[in-house]
Image (cartoon, rainbow, N blue to C red):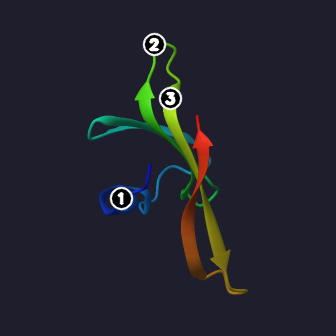
Amino acid sequence: MKIGDKLLKELSKRYEPESTVDKKFGKYDLTFRTDKEGNPVMLFIGHRNENGRITGDRFTTVIARDPAGKVIKDHWDAKGRA
């Protein structure tokens, strides 16, 4: 699975810091964890089962910052099935 532009736009928003967010995105269920600044850093996408767990794919983000804290680049890496 590949992360599309619409999902990237959703993941570029800020959320509650250091929390887990559950959302519905089109036909998929999303669960992501945020860092201390509220940026999503780990994403589970797929379909939620009766236990509340996502069956699908797992992604993590890599964020490179300069010494001043400005984001130089960031991208999402596929980490396999969840």
From the viewer's perspective, is 48 left or right of 76?
A: left
- x then y, percent, for residue 65: 66, 79
The residue lying at 68 percent from left, 85 percent from top is 66
Please tell me whether residue 74 is drawn above or below residue 49 in the rendered image. below
Dot 3, how many residues are within 10 Å of its Cα: few (below 14), some (14-19), or many (20+)? many
Q: Amino acid at mark 2?
A: Glu
Q: Amino acid at mark 1?
A: Gly
Q: Indicate the secondary structure of the residue bearing disc 2.
A: loop
Point out the tag, 2 or 1, that comes first from the N-terminus.
Answer: 1
The residue lying at 62 percent from left, 47 percent from top is 18
Q: How far is mark 1 from mark 3, CA to CA?
A: 19 Å
Quadrant of the rendered structure where residue 22 is? top left
Residue behind mark 2: 50
Please tell me whether residue 72 is drawn above or below residue 50 in the rendered image. below
Residue behind mark 1: 4
Residue behind mark 3: 54
The residue most toward the right is 67
The residue lying at 60 percent from left, 82 percent from top is 70
